[in-house]
Amino acid sequence: ISFLGSTGFSSNPGWRKIGEKQVDYRMDHDVLNASVHDGSFKQIKFVVRGGSLNMYKCVVHFQNGERQEIELRNNFKRGSDSRVIDLEGKQRFIDKISFWYDTKNASNQKAKMVVWGK
């Protein structure tokens, strides 16, 4: 599955953009608030645009108060994406996603993390 097109929708039916977050140049922790609240998701995928970043882990916070921690240990280069990640449980309505990363790399551009869900 490639999400590198302009919207990702046309070539990837069923996938919706959950949200995006511009990240900083240093070791950081950020929270991406879900921009869609009208559907449940069974899978998510991360796509990095702009610069590159090293992601260590993320925690998906669901609207019912539950959470799922995901170890990623991914070094995203510009334009790369993660594996498809299965969410535990049923009817997973995402509230927000916390993620920990650093941008210690040769990129001179800030990275943008885009999260897709299906």
Image (cartoon, grey):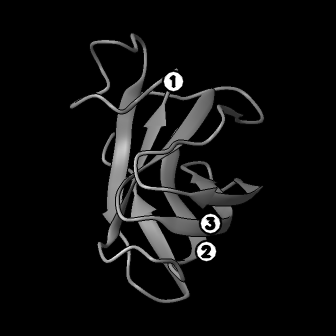
The total number of labels drawn is 3
Q: Which marked residue is nearer to the observer: mark 3 or mark 2?
A: 3
Disc 1 from disc 3: Cα separation: 21 Å
Q: Residue at x 46, y 70 (%)?
A: 31
Q: Residue 74's image quarter?
A: bottom right
For label 3, the residue is 55
The residue closer to the viewer here, 112 or 108, is 108
Q: Is residue 63 left or right of residue 83?
A: left
Q: Residue furthest front?
A: 106
Q: Amino acid at mark 3?
A: Met
Q: Which mark is residue 118?
A: 1
Q: Which marked residue is nearer to the observer: mark 1 or mark 3?
A: 3
Q: Residue at x 47, y 75 (%)?
A: 30
Q: Position of residue 48 (x, y in %)?
A: 43, 52
Q: Residue at x 45, y 64 (%)?
A: 52
Element at label 1: loop
Q: Are marks 3 and 2 in contact (CB under 8 Å)?
A: yes
Q: Which mark is residue 100?
A: 2
Q: Earlier in the sequence, mark 1 or mark 2?
A: 2
